[in-house]
């Protein structure tokens, strides 16, 4: 009886196994660099010659319709953005309205303009400039546009002077109005700048800025 031997699943690798002949490889073509008769590529002018690179840049700029001089002028004339104010005029006058309990923001705006205009006549130097820059532009202009007085008014005189500009005002209501505005301003500019502003004013203004510890000075 003849027995059929099954073929192995893996191809044997014995010595007697005939390995397939590799495919014939064509010789690689010689590159142009190896062939001295082939034309050599021209070197890059931009890489070899800085003057040529700059000239190419100028030509490209002209082709794009934006000469290099115009681009340079645009960069030089671009001003850095100004820092945004710490608050807005609307936010400041709304703070005055809430502090003073006024029924409308229009009334708060009117009082804010009166008080800041009067305050601008009492400040000079760095404190004046710092206060104007720390407030919204509308408020800062009211400070910076005033001519400083040769001698500042006392706190009581300051309130009395503003009382004459506020309709139906008394010394007590005028003090309330002035304090409402300056307290909101103090909250906006912070305690450090408030201290600097108070250093230029006579004793007694601290209460108007919401500094209760000096309330006796106004009594």
Image (cartoon, rainbow, N blue to C red):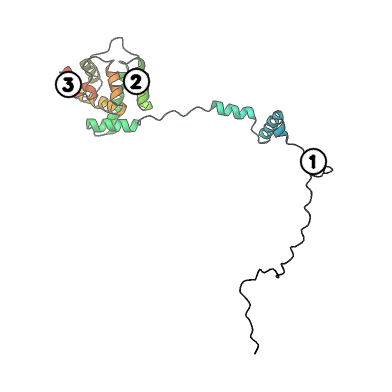
- Could you say where residue 100 lies in the image, as x and y percent from the top left? 22, 30
Q: In the visual, does 100 lie left or right of 22?
A: left
Front-lying residue, 15 or 69: 15
Query: For mark 2, does the 10 Å Cα neighbourhood hold few (<14), some (14 to 19), or many (20 or more) residues?
Result: many
Quadrant assignment, res 32: top right
| Location of mark 2 (residue) | 143
**Mark 3 and mark 1: Cα distance apart in space:** 94 Å
Q: Secondary structure at mark 3?
A: helix
Precedes in sequence: disc 2 or disc 1: 1
| Location of mark 3 (residue) | 215
Q: Is residue 68 visible?
A: yes
**Mark 2 and mark 3: Cα distance apart in space:** 25 Å
- Please identify the quadrant where the N terminus is shown: bottom right
| Location of mark 1 (residue) | 40
Q: Secondary structure at mark 1?
A: loop
**Mark 2 and mark 1: Cα distance apart in space:** 76 Å
Instruction: In the rendered view, tell whether residue 128 sits above or below residue 67.
Output: above
Instruction: In the rendered view, tell whether residue 142 sits above or below residue 15.
Output: above
Quadrant assignment, res 177: top left
Q: Which numbered mark, 2 or 3, is in the foreground of this view?
A: 3
Quadrant assignment, res 84: top left
Q: Which numbered mark, 2 or 1, is in the foreground of this view?
A: 1
């Amino acid at each position: 009886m003849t027995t059929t031997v099954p073929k192995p699943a893996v191809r044997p690798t014995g010595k007697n196994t005939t390995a397939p002949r590799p495919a014939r490889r064509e010789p690689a073509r010689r590159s142009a660099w190896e062939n001295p008769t082939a034309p050599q590529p021209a070197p890059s002018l931009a890489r070899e010659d800085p003057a040529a690179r700059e000239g190419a840049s100028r030509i490209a700029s002209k082709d794009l319709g934006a000469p290099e001089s115009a681009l340079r002028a645009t960069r030089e004339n671009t001003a850095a953005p100004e820092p945004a104010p710490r608050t807005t005029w609307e936010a400041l006058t709304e703070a005055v309205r809430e502090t003073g309990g006024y029924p409308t923001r229009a009334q708060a705006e009117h009082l804010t303009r009166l008080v800041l205009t009067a305050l601008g006549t009492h400040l000079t130097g760095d404190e004046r400039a710092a206060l104007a820059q720390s407030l919204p532009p509308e408020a800062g202009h009211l400070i910076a546009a005033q001519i400083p007085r040769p001698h500042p008014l006392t706190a009581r005189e300051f309130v009395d002077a503003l009382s004459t500009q506020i309709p139906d005002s008394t010394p007590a209501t005028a003090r309330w109005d002035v304090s409402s505005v300056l307290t909101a301003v103090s909250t906006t500019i912070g305690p450090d700048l408030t201290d600097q502003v108070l250093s230029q004013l006579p004793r007694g203004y601290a209460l108007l800025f919401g500094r209760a510890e000096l309330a006796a000075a106004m009594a």
